[in-house]
Structures are given as C-alpha cells and as structure tokens.
Image (spheres, rainbow, N blue to C red):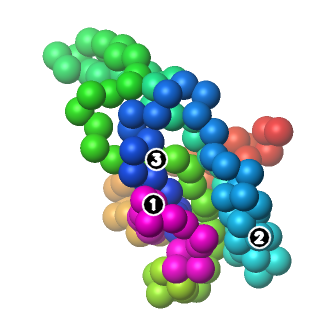
C-alpha cells in the first residue's frame, strides 16, 4: 500500500520567499529519511518552497485565473512530502510518529488510490494511466 505523508509546518503559509530550514533540523530529518530508505519503504521525498514563491490556478466560471502566492486564505500549506510503500495504514502512522518534527509541524497521512480501488468503468476511463505514471518515474 502506498501512502503519502504530507508535512504541514505551521507558519509556512506566510513564510518569505527563500525561507530555509535550519541545518540541525535538516540533519535530524536526514537520519529519519535514511531510516525510511534503509527499511526499503521510501519511494520519493521532497521539500517545497514556501507558498510566497508559488502560484494557484483557479477555474471559476471555466476560465483559468492565476493568483501568485502568498495566499491570504491559506491556513495550512505543505512544506514537503514522503511517498512510502508499507503493509498497512498502521505502519504508515508508525513511520510518521518517528519523524523528528517540531511542535509546529503536523504530518497528514493519505493512502494513494490504486487503480484496483476503482470500479471497472473508471478503470476503463483511465486506460493507460499506469503506463503514464511509470514513464513519468523514468524521467530523471
């Protein structure tokens, strides 16, 4: 089962462009990342720049509209993620509980939808999705 663990750092929604974590926090997180890797459950991971450097595309009325960050209405934003492959929701939670997160951080755990989870008509509508996903993984 694949799960995405989403890091939600409080205050990151208003962080200035170029805001970076402290080296000691990164060192602690690297030990955690190495534990995930050594256990063979880590599929992907990345940190994200603050929303002040991002953009959102809204589709109200069927017309795309771009809003540059920061986003005043945002209460929680993503700071990074891990994609892991584990046997159960409980194992994903156990890994999240080992993260050296601060008092100001939350990890949300979400199971990835697998094609087999969908009814047959949805699987047919998404024909080619698995191949598309695999080819996207092959791009460096």
Residue labelled with disc 2: 31
Q: What element does badge 2 sit on?
A: helix
Q: Is residue 21 visible?
A: yes
Earlier-in-chain disc, 3 versus 2: 2
For the C terminus, the quadrant is top right
Earlier along the polypeptide chain: callout 3 or callout 1?
3
Q: Residue at x 67, y 58 (%)?
A: 25
Q: Which residues are magenta?
A: 95-112
Q: What percent of the width, then of the height, locates residue 128?
A: 58, 46
Instruction: Quarter of the image for the N terminus: give it.
Output: bottom right
SS class of the residue under badge 3?
loop
Label 1's element?
strand
Q: Is residue 50 magenta?
A: no
Give me the C-alpha separation between circle 3 and circle 2: 21 Å
Whether pointer 3 and pointer 1 mark residues with C-beta atoms closer than 8 Å, the reply is: no
Residue 93 position, x and y percent, is 48, 80
Q: Residue at x 71, y 66 (%)?
A: 28
């Amino acid at each position: 089962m694949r799960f995405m663990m989403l890091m939600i750092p409080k205050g990151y929604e208003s962080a200035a462009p170029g805001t970076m974590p402290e080296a000691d926090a990164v060192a602690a997180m690297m030990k955690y990342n190495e534990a995930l890797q050594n256990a063979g459950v880590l599929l992907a991971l990345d940190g994200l720049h603050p929303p002040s450097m991002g953009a959102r595309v809204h589709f109200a009325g069927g017309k795309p509209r771009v809003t540059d960050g920061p986003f005043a209405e945002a209460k929680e934003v993503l700071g990074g993620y891990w994609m892991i492959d584990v046997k159960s929701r409980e194992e994903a939670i156990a890994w999240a509980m080992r993260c050296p997160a601060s008092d100001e951080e939350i990890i949300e755990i979400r199971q990835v939808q697998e094609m087999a989870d969908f009814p047959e008509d949805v699987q047919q509508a998404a024909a080619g999705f698995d191949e598309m996903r695999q080819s996207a993984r092959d791009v460096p």
